[in-house]
Each structure stands twice: as structure tokens, then as C-alpha cells.
Amino acid sequence: MKSSLGTLLDSGESGLFLLEGASDTDTDMVALQAHARGYQFLNLDCREIGGKAALMQAAKQVFQLPAYFGENWDALTDCLMDLSWLPGLRWVLLVEGLQRLWTEDSESYRMTLEILRDASAFWEEQERPFIVLLREDCGPEAASSPPVAFA
């Protein structure tokens, strides 16, 4: 059974979820729901990202990664399992537009989702929710994530 975004946020569960029924204009509503429940909201817009270098730059900006961030997969993994510089103790990351990365650099696409899964699992073990919401434009692997209804 598909849960709603509000139900997911209330559950405190971590993981990657396919956010169904949300349009570009709904980003603010997702942020409001997250903030109302005590989450730090982050938005990773990948619509213009076609490769690893651009993805690393976007992640650096969105996650406010420290100066020592090495712009490689291991460094991204390490930083996402720290996040001590970000406010809050629970996070919602809305990811959109990964389809382009899938098309232009499928290996970086797979690594990105793997790292997000690993970070979610790590924070779940710490009992600190790290929810990744994948919009429907996030490529084939996103479709296999548990669905969450926006409405």
C-alpha cells in the first residue's frame, strides 16, 4: 500500500522513495511539510547535470560540504555520513532530474543512487531520518523505489 508524504515523514523512516504526483511547483509544499515536522529540507536539482563533475559541484552546494570535500565518490560518501555542519538532526532530500545523468553517464547515476542508499541506511542506524525523495524524472532505478503519494 502506498503511503502519503505526510505519513512517511511522520514515520521517521529513512530510505529512497519515489515521490509520485508532485510537479515542479510542488517543491515548496514538500519543503513546508518537511519543515513542519522538524526536518531540514534540501533540494538537489539534477536537470542540468550530465556527468560526475557537475554532480559533485551540485552536491557541494546543496549539502554545504566543507572545503576539504575531495569531489570524488568516497569523499561524497564520507560527507553524507557526517553532516555535522548542517542544521538539524533529520533530513529530507528532494532529488529531481536524474534522467539526464542516467542518459549521459549511467555509471555516475548508479553511484549517486548507491551513495544515497548507503547514507540513508547509515542515518537509519543512528536513528536520525535521512529521507530521499526521487521525483518521477529520476530514471529507471528510481521507479523501483517504494512509492509515496504527494497528495
Image: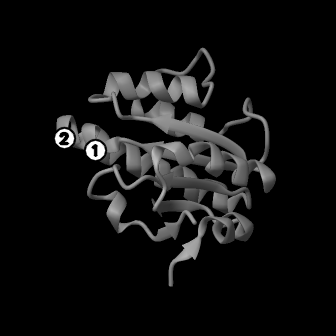
Look at the image and tell me whether residue 38 can be seen: no
Q: Residues within 10 Å of mark 2 (few under 14, many from 20)?
A: few
Q: Are marks 1 and 2 in contact (CB under 8 Å)?
A: yes
Q: Amino acid at mark 1?
A: Gln
To which quarter of the image does residue 122 belong? bottom right
Please name the residue shown 60% across and 25% down the image. 65
x and y percent of residue 8 in the render? 64, 68
Q: Can you identify the residue that label 1 sits on?
A: 99
Task: Using the image, determine if residue 4 lies above or below residue 133.
Answer: below
Q: Residue tagged by mark 2?
A: 103
Name the spot of residue 84 as percent of width and height, x first: 74, 35
Relative to 142, is 104 on the left or the right? left
Q: Can you name the residue that lies furthest to the top here?
A: 67
Q: Residue furthest front?
A: 25
In the rendered structure, which amino acid carries the disc numbered 2? Thr
Q: Is residue 58 left or right of residue 130?
A: left
